[in-house]
Amino acid sequence: MMDKEKIKQGVRLLLQGIGEDVNREGLLETPDRIARMCEEIYGGLYEDADKHLAKQFTVDNNEMVIEKDITFYSTCEHHLLPFYGKAHIGYIPNGKVVGLSKLARTVDVYARRPEIQEKMTTQIADALERCLNPQGVMVMLEAEHTCMTMRGIKKPGTKTVTTVVRGCFKDDYEKQKMFLQMVKD
């Protein structure tokens, strides 16, 4: 579990390290605020994504299912700065589907960890493959990284796009094209 006292100590040290007075009025409660914030934005570290995909429903139709524009917020593990964007998930069922909100919950579990976008994309695809055993999965994330927009190269508006393609999507470029077209519409 999360150690709030260590977080508070770390925040105090960081503030002192940048030359701030940790006893000034505006910063007195900041360590506690940051510790509470960490419980929320890093809560995915203590959550199993598979539990969201456990409740499934039998279907006769094994056509493509797409959930697009799932908003997510995550934290870059390299700079501890936010990255945020949209996740798009497509899968071809193998006789079973999952509730649509469960796809968004799965994205949230992985987003609420210190991450890199490439790993997060793979983790989402792995969870769907592991839990649903679909004929195929395609996951695409589009995100803006504040470690690129507010520091370093300073290129606001730049988007990073990552994809993972599995199963019947792997070599079927028509299915990939269909997914991408539906995501962009």
Image (tube, grey):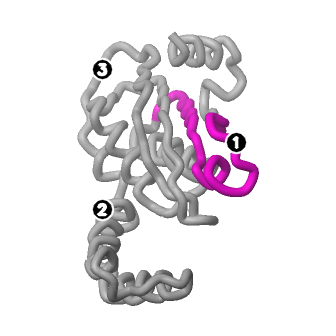
Whichever of labels 3 and 1 marks the residue nearer the N terminus, that label is 3
- Asked whether residue 12 is drawn in magenta, I would say no
Q: In the rendered image, is residue 185 in sight?
A: yes
Q: How dense is the environment of label 2, judged by Cα within 10 Å: few (below 14), some, or many (20 and up)?
A: few
Q: Position of residue 176 (x, y in %)?
A: 63, 19
Give the side of residue 25 with respect to residue 42, left or right.
left
Amino acid at the residue labelled 1:
Lys
The residue beneath circle 1 is 155
41 relative to 38, above or below: above
In the depicted view, which residue is nearer to us: 108 or 98?
A: 108
Q: Position of residue 61 (x, y in %)?
A: 36, 13
The residue beneath circle 3 is 59
Q: How dense is the environment of label 1, judged by Cα within 10 Å: few (below 14), some, or many (20 and up)?
A: some
The residue beneath circle 2 is 40
Residue at 55% across, 86% down: 17
Q: Which residues are magenta?
A: 134-163
Amino acid at the residue labelled 3:
Val
Q: Furthest residue to the right? A: 153
